[in-house]
Amino acid sequence: MVAKLDTQTRRWDDSTNSTSTTPSTYSSDSSSLDSNEDGDSSDELTQPPPTSTSEKAYGTLHSEFGHCLNQEYRRTSRHTLGSPVKTAEEHDPPYYILLSTYVSYLFLICIGHMRDFFGKRLTATNYIHLMSHDGYAALNSDFDSFYTRRLKQRIDDLFSRPVTGVPGRTIMLLDREFSANNTNQHLTGTRTRALNISSYNYLGFAQATGGCADAVEEGIRQYGVSACGARLEGGSVDFHMQAEKLVARFVGMEDSLLSSMGFATNSTIIPALCGRGSLVISDELNHASIRFGVRLSGASVRMFKHNDMESLEALLREVISQGQPRTHRSWRKIVVIVEGLYSMEGTLVNLPGIMALKDKYKFYLFVDEAHSIGALGPHGRGVADYFSISPRRIDILMGTFTKSFGAAGGYIAGSKTLIDSLRAHGHSGAYAESMSPPVLTQVIASMASIMGVEPPLPPHSPRTYVNGHANADRRAIEAYDYPGTAPTSLLPQWLSLPPHLRDGSEGRERLRRLAFNARYLSIGLQKLGFITYGHPDSPIIPLLLFNPGKMPAFSRMMLARKTPIVVVVVAYPATPLVTSRVRFCVSASHTKADVDTLLRACDEIGDALDLKHGPGKRWSVERVIEHAVELVRGEVE
Amino acid sequence: MDDVEAALKPVVYYLSYALAAAEYSFYKIPGSAVIARYVKSSHQNDPGRTLLELLLVIFAISTLLHSRTRADKSGRHFIKFTEKEIDELVDEWNPEPLAQPLDEDEQADLAAVPVIAGASGPRPTLVGTGKTVLNLASYNFAGLAGNETIKDRAIETLRKYGLGSCGPPGFYGTIDVHMDLERDIASFLGTEAAILYSQGFSTISSVIPAFCKRGDVIVVDRGVNFAIQKGIQISRSTIRWFDHNDLNSLVEVLEGVEKERRKRKGPLTRRFIVTEGVFENDGKMVDLPKLIELKLKYKYRLILDESFSFGTTGRTGRGLTEFYNIPASQVDMLVGSVANGLNSSGGFCAGSKVVVDHQRINGTSFVFSAAMPALLAVSASEGIRILQNSPQTGVLERLRENVRAVRGVLGGVRCVEIPSCEESAIVHLYIRSSSSEEDQSYLTTTSAKNNPTSAQPRNPPTFHIASEERLLQHIVAECLSHGVMVTRAKRLRGQEMVEPRPSIKLALSAALKREECVFAATVIGDAFVRVLEGEGRMGVAK
């Protein structure tokens, strides 16, 4: 079945070579591509809506990458220069919500302790691994594991849901059954296809069909699945070098270094950047991998309030004037580590603010673009692109390939001197396995299709942007030259991309679809009256639930709908105690209809669960859906 | 005066009213009468005590508020500057450059890293020279690189799952093929369960801190690999070191810890022994039966890193537990590398269900990292199948045959010392120490006392790192010019806790023919002799 689809896709590719000038579109008979697989029931998740013959459909599998042809539903992700950077406005819920949240936790904790108390006396065998026995201390004491056992276990069905197939626009869940207070689970053998609003698949490159998958197949044929060793020993292939050059070009830096795991990029490289006598200033909400790396580095650490420039400046003034603790010697260097887009909050770093501070306080800036690379900016080059700031003004750019590129691993980009030093002194070069060739192929193919391959460059594509803003802004825009397209010389000879990927047209389309979807969902939810966090252009949209009891209710109700939707709920300890939330990750693969479906679902469930506590005037869901384009363009208030 | 009194009257009146209201509302709080009675009676008995208690309350409140302000600011060392002074200090401050340019040796080293053009395998072509070489540098122990069945399975998986998992295991990143591979590993090894990490190197440095917390005791071998060092560093546990691969020294340390504990009469803490099956740094093998005996006797849990023995050692490559015929369930946390042993990517930790499930919430690099791509998991599962069938296909027998062949040739070369055990598919080659006295001091233990709190051994072996590395690099280049690709064991000098001795690290493969191995070993041996003779080191060695 899969092979058949694949040959079909390629046949279309060939036909479009000769016939169509807009190669990413195909004639509408392509719906046969979406014929059922695995006994899937035919519904809106797998079948594209019927189109009139004058319209064209995508050559993608609708269940992986939705067909959405209306060019109205597009947007360019860019910060309007001169406008202030929106910092998260956090709206507080009514007091009764806060109070009931605290009471809920208190209740859960009391019940948990009671169950422990009686359980230990009545069914001691169940607690044996939590208590000291036979002279062994408990591996995980009953105290340490209390939260996991007594709070998380109650809602274990929301986490680690096993899946199969492509984590694209939709995802196939393997249904589970729980028994014995959620301690046992087994698969029932049935499956549920659900709308996937949870995977980090921003540009929709999680695909088993299409140009990238074809390239990966060729990559496996050529290189096998492993590069067999660490980069500095016997695990370097030419492919790594090519990918590193391309990544450097993509992000606009001199050089880059790849790492086979996103987490390890931070945890093994940061120790090579700074050590004793250096100071790391870290945003309080930075990812665990950054904290892991900083702890290994031996550098001193200070934290500043999330994305708060005043707090950062005050801290900088303090640490520079005070110097190192006790000795008061001046710091050898100060590295400020921030994330481009925060995965739990959806906030966008205030890069212009940080750049202004950087000029004054001479610190080095490390931006972790794990979520923002590919997902933000008119060319998908991350936060620097979004704010029209030259990436070279940032010292270290880090990012991952897991999210926007549908691959795995991560990169560090910077000056040649820096990267060479990290090659020689970073942990991963000498000890960790190098990136595997299929992953490299996916990275190169998806990246090249976002960039577009030179030549040819469509003449209308502007390289610099000049708008009618204040003078300083215009200078900034003129100075900003986005990192550009991929020269053919940087791609492996054998790599053949279909024309719509090669010329970057599909890449642009994906970027524009993502930008629209992100803003539409974010603003739509606000109009419906929900409290959301984060920047309206962020593809990560957290919706606040507050009460712990509403997490399982929300998630289960979403899954039980006629069109099932899978969501991610997060609570303490990943978030502060009161702000439990559900987190949506939109993708370019979603259609406007998908976002409509989601908004309708949220609207209904929001009413049922009393979630609408946001400020401002409420709109009905139909009105939001009808005025989607105006809302995204900011034409209505 | 009357005016003043008149003016104050409403104030006094208001105050007394407020006091009465406060008293009234205070008594409305349930239980307040008890407090009031307590205060009254204690004041009656001992007015000084009231003052003391009041002071205590003030102290408690001030401490509480105090701890919220930053320690630095209020500390003794905080200097108050004016804004202007701070501005000047900021202007004056000049940071060091972010990175120092590499020195010449480092640059040469980086430039000398062999890069393979196209697929890696037993006989790859190199970028630059375009020559085809014999590969004794890449990890391809069971010869799985380029295996057509694995490629087919990988492509099949790609067409069903795409490439990336696009999420951590907790959030829709748990794909059925991951569960299959975990099951495959567990049943292959004979443990209850296994958990998959997406990078081999990051596995153990996450497994250790998942279990070992502040106050726990970890007893570690002095020769452990870098990943373990990082793991114990992040765990913040109490570390005790024993001599490299010396179980007598381990006994001493275990006794010492026990004595310490009895003296302190502290509560029972978690205790772990962390070591490697086959050591990454020199290829020595631990005496597992003895180790298990000790850990059971002293009631320690064992974290065993089998990154270089899983997939190579034992009849079907199950590692040390198979080699010594010990049930794998005896090892509490058995960590292995899917990347090294199965030519895919990632690592695993096998153990009881409790051990594995604990990591699903507490294993940092498991929880906070995307799951590995589906096709790599399937490739690894296929690799296990190939290993299981190895008694029929003779894959691992060929590997052992090749190890024997290489050791046979190089064992006869006077200036080469092989620390690795015969079962190790990684063969380290040292430059044999030039004088015999040094040799002895390295091997024998003198009266110097082992200091378990320090990573440094009591009799640090003497070798000159820079010069030996330079010589070994010459040998590597010499081998390459004769069509044999080998590599120096790359170490981050200055970052390792105990500097491992410079060595050439051969990674043997079942995909090489025996004659090729003999040829390669001869080339390597000749290169050793030629380079060391050129340096005049041979004369001393004789």
Image (cartoon, grey):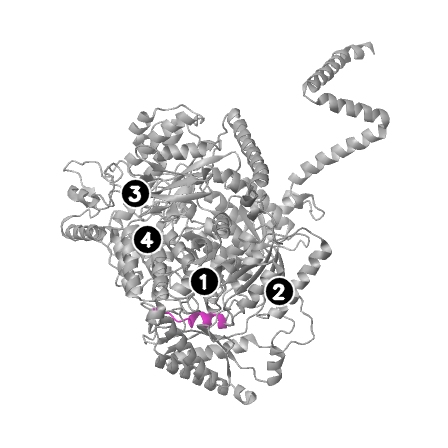
Q: Which residue is mark 4?
A: B163
Location of residue B172 in the rendering, given as x and y in whole percent from the top left corner: 38, 45
Residue B76 in magenta stretch = no
**Viewer-nearest of labels 2 and 3?**
2
Residue interval drawn in magenta = B104-116
Q: Amino acid at mark 3?
A: Ser
The crowd level at tag 3 (other Cα within 10 Å; few <14, some 14-19, many 20+) is many
Question: Closer to the N terminus: mark 4 or mark 2?
Answer: 4
Q: Secondary structure at mark 2?
A: strand
Q: Secondary structure at mark 4?
A: loop
Q: Quadrant of residue B240?
A: bottom right
Q: Which mark is residue B241?
A: 2
Residue annotated with mark 3: A589
The crowd level at tag 1 (other Cα within 10 Å; few <14, some 14-19, many 20+) is: many
Residue A493: image location, x then y, percent: 26, 63
**Chain that bears disc 1:** A
Q: CA distance from mark 2 to mark 3?
A: 54 Å
Residue B257 position, x and y percent, is: 67, 60
Residue B130 disc label: none
Q: Describe residue A69's horizontal placement relative to residue B379 as left or right.
A: left
Determine whether label 4 and label 2 are within 8 Å by CB: no
Q: Disc 4 versus disc 1: distance between alpha carbons? A: 21 Å
In the rendered image, the vertical position of residue A272 relative to residue B463, given as above or below: above
On whether disc 4 and disc 1 are found on a single subunit, the reply is: no
Amino acid at pointer 4: Leu
- Which label was assigned to residue A432? 1
Give me the C-alpha separation between circle 1 and circle 2.
25 Å
